[in-house]
Amino acid sequence: MCLITFAWQPGSPIPLRLMGNRDEFHARPTASLDHWQDNAEIAGGRDLEAGGSWLAVKRGGIVAALTNVRDPHLTLPPDAPSRGHLVADALQCDDIEAWLIALSKGDALRYAGFNLLVATPQRLWHLHRGRERLSLSEVAPGVHGLSNADLNSPWPKLVHVRNALEQSFLLDWPSSVKDAMQNPHEANIDELPDTGVGLELERQLSAAFIVGERYGTRATSWLTLDQAGNIEITEQSFGPLGRFESETTLAISRHQI
């Protein structure tokens, strides 16, 4: 994904509310939200080119979500695996914490830059692999945002969607947050981050919802994870120029998918 906002409230009836956009080339083959044929305990969208995912969940109450880190100066390792495999691996490893610790001690350097969120009803980890830092931490309770930098980096679109969640998630989830997430407004030039991609592209990528013929927002997804481990997840899919294509909702019980 390229933009995520989430509310983490451990100990509450719904510890996690999360919404995100996936931005990608429209020509890249993709499977929409569904149960995975090779592992029926997992549900999510899937990148059919590399086999990974940007957001997926597993029966029992596990959520994994990924954003790329946008940094042209970050050296890509030779034969780097797809970052989307991290989502699949997080949901299929036997010991999540041990797997994350191994990544944070150097295994993550095999990949290009990324942010990985992994949640259970009791814990939420954030693993950041950037050019200057590789770190693993548990996320503090509260409302947060992720884009293509670090957690809560104050990019305009991140601040906008995080504020929408902060102000209304108890009363108007998910509609008002979805409105913010699907806003195509581009940031003013003086608000833009400088990630080394040039002003024109920086401006295009500053919109929460990117509208383009070749590249743009292809999915908006949102989910809730309750204290018992039950998950409800919805995905809206979009084609070129932001054309709505479909909406799918799955309710995944802790005990039966």
Image (cartoon, helix red, strand yellow):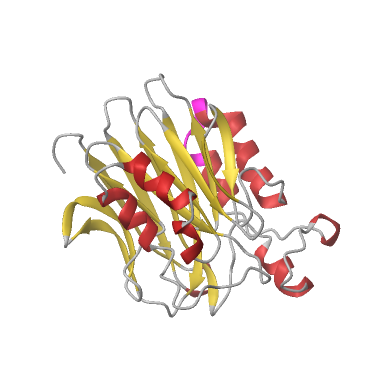
Q: Main secondary structure of the magenta part?
A: helix
* Image coords of residue 128 (percent x, y): 55, 50
* Image coords of residue 252 (percent x, y): 23, 41
Q: Residue at x 27, y 49 (%)?
A: 93
- Say which of 51 and 3 sits in front: 51
Q: Residue at x 61, y 57 (%)?
A: 130
Determine whether 66 is above or below 94 in the image.
Answer: below
- Tell me where the magenta segment starts and ends, as one range: 170-175
Q: Residue at x 58, y 68 (%)?
A: 211
Determine whether 24 is above or below 124 in the image.
Answer: below
- Based on the picture, tell me whether residue 185 belongs to the magenta stretch: no
Q: Residue at x 17, y 56 (%)?
A: 39
| Residue furthest front as drawn | 105
- Say which of 107 and 89 sits in front: 107
Quadrant of the frame with the C terminus: top left
Relative side of 96 to 251, left or right: right
